[in-house]
Image (spheres, rainbow, N blue to C red):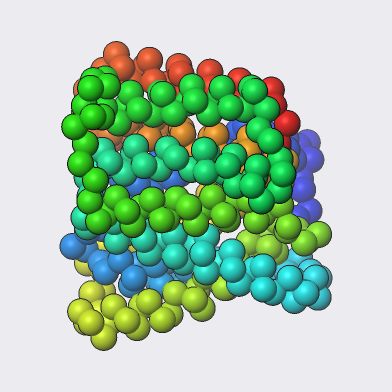
Amino acid sequence: MTEIDATTHAPRRLWDRPILLLSMTSLIWAGHAVVGKIAVGEIGPMTLTFLRWSLAFPAILFAARGDFVRDLPALRKSWLLILSLGAFGYTAFNALFYLSAHYTAALNMALIQACIPALVLIGAALGFGARPTLPQTLGALVTMTGVAIVAAQGDLWRLLRLGFNFGDLLLLGACGLYAYFSLALRRRPDVSVISFLAAMALAAMLTSIPAFLWEAARDGVRWPSPRGLGVLLYAAMGPAFLGQLCFVRGVELIGPGRAGVFVNLVPIFGALLAVVLLGEPLAAYHLVALALVIGGIALAQRGQG
């Protein structure tokens, strides 16, 4: 019989494999990038952010139930850290991500998100004095090359012709916030992963209320259409619940520097999802980029987190 972790009720064999956990996270986030574009015109960006966490928090809390009560004293001591992680890493990141989709192209979004691992390494060096190892640095560069190939659709000269707009700046700010989130996870209190996630989800739900009210006052509440409802359900149960659970555990196992490199799988998986779900052709540059990203990730894992 497979041993079950008492905290997560997940097979320990999976729960202790950071490469698998972080790869699953990237796949879920790739799907989120697709539905983020679908959400435009179907539901307001701030409404989506608020409703996403309003649905995700009860589900996460139910999964955490006994552990959350046990860990509540330790969580209270770290309330300021939890509030900042929920506000910046969840609410602000999601709001900027959904808002940027109204102004910029998917090509630019794929390219800009690839800067997160580099921002994590820079932040680790500046904020924690953790110099990236040579394998980490080379791995990050190799994976970003693979992402650039996908973003340029095999024509690297295309990168020179990209124009940056307001949406790109919003997304760049969102990437900076998520890099902070990844680094701040180092200070996680000694509680179970699911309890910590429940606390951050509560913080995200509460801090998303002002943005929702602002959008409602300015544009009126744009409740989800039937298509928008599907986007909302995926956003809540996929990236907000399962994806974050896998990511937080992955960072716990190997550190933010090595875990951050896996973010470069997002545009690769996104391209593959477009092939499978949307019937787009599979090009040779997809395979080249996939090989570079996987090779870069393997190289980065030789460094210390």
Q: Quadrant of the C terminus?
A: top right
- Along the viewing direction, whichever of 47 and 171 lies nearer the viewer: 171
Residue 300: image quadrant is: top right
Query: Is residue 290 depicted above or below 225 in this figure?
Result: above
Q: Quadrant of the N terminus?
A: top right
Residue 197 lies, in percent from the top left, at: 63, 61
- Along the viewing direction, whichever of 130 and 117 lies nearer the viewer: 130
Residue 87 lies, in percent from the top left, at: 52, 69
Left/right placement of residue 149 relative to residue 264 reads left
Count of numbered circles in the view: 0
Q: Residue at x 58, y 55 (%)?
A: 181
Residue 227 lies, in percent from the top left, at: 24, 59
Q: Residue at x 48, y 22 (%)?
A: 142
Left/right placement of residue 183 relative to residue 291 reads right
Residue located farthest toward the bottom when viewing the structure as drawn: 217
Residue 84: image quadrant is: bottom right
Q: Residue at x 63, y 38 (%)?
A: 257
Whether residue 33 appears in this view of the structure is: yes
Left/right placement of residue 133 relative to residue 180 reads right
Q: Residue at x 55, y 34 (%)?
A: 261
Query: Is residue 1 depicted above or below 198 in this figure?
Result: above
Whether residue 64 appears in this view of the structure is: no
Query: Is residue 60 depicted above or below 249 in this figure?
Result: below
Residue 249 lies, in percent from the top left, at: 67, 47
Left/right placement of residue 198 relative to residue 12 reads left
